[in-house]
Image (cartoon, helix red, strand yellow):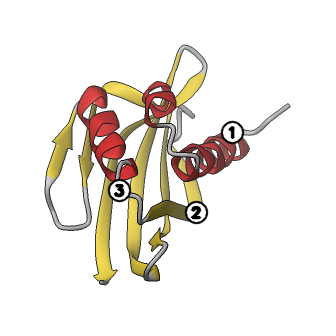
Amino acid sequence: MTTPTDAILARRRLTNKLIAAKEAARLKPFFVPGVNVIVGDGSLISGAEAVVAAFAAQFADPDFVAFVRTAEAVELDTDGERAAERGAWVAVSRSQGEHIAGWYLAAWTKVRGQWLIESETFITLRS
């Protein structure tokens, strides 16, 4: 049986692959409808549709390669229905390689047996 931590880490790896493949629409099922994402510059993106649209806009840039999130820890709440994932992130472009990076925190919630992202905060520490 897959542990919640393993399930969350597997879903994170899959989001990294979908981002590298520039498949914005396929990212939507990973978010609760009312997701909130604070991006590296401090801006807020609210709602799964808006998050997917933001990814699609970035994917349209021919210089864009990927955003890679590397989890360092996942911790579950006592009920096993919510989790916090923290780790490092990096933006990769064709012209600059790994050029923007920092830390992130993602809140996951279990919805009908599936782990979904309810919020993410990205902090840019290198640009």
Residue 36, image quadrant? top left
Residue under the point 30% across and 57% down? 121
Give percent across and percent down for residue 52.
34, 35
Q: Circle 2 sits on which residue?
A: 71
SS under mark 1? helix
- Tell me which residue sits at (40%, 49%) in the image: 59
Instruction: Please name the residue shown 41% across and 31% down the image.
Output: 31
Q: Secondary structure at mark 2?
A: strand
Question: Label 1: which residue?
Answer: 7
Against 4, is 66 above or below?
below
Q: State the image coordinates of residue 4 (x, y, percent, origin top left).
A: 67, 38
Q: How far apart are the alpha carbons under marks 2 and 1? A: 13 Å
- Residue 18, quarter of the rendered image: top right
**Residue at mark 3 to residue at mark 1: CA–CA distance:** 31 Å
**Extreme residue in the top direction:** 112
Q: Are marks 2 and 1 in contact (CB under 8 Å)?
A: no
Which is more N-terminal, label 1 or label 2? 1
Q: Which mark is residue 126?
A: none
Residue 53 against residue 113 in the figure, above or below:
below
Please provide percent x and percent y for residue 27.
48, 34
Residue reaching furthest front? 62
Depth check, mark 3 against mark 1: the one in front is 3
User: How packed is label 3: few (under 14 Cα within 10 Å), some, or many (20 or more)?
Assistant: few
Disc marking residue 61: 3
Dot 2 amino acid type:
Ala
Residue occupying the point 58% across, 63% down: 71
Name the amino acid type tagged 3.
Asp
Which of the two residues, 108 or 59, is positioned nearer the viewer here? 59
Q: Of circles 2 and 3, which is in front?
A: 3
CA gap, disc 2 and disc 3? 26 Å
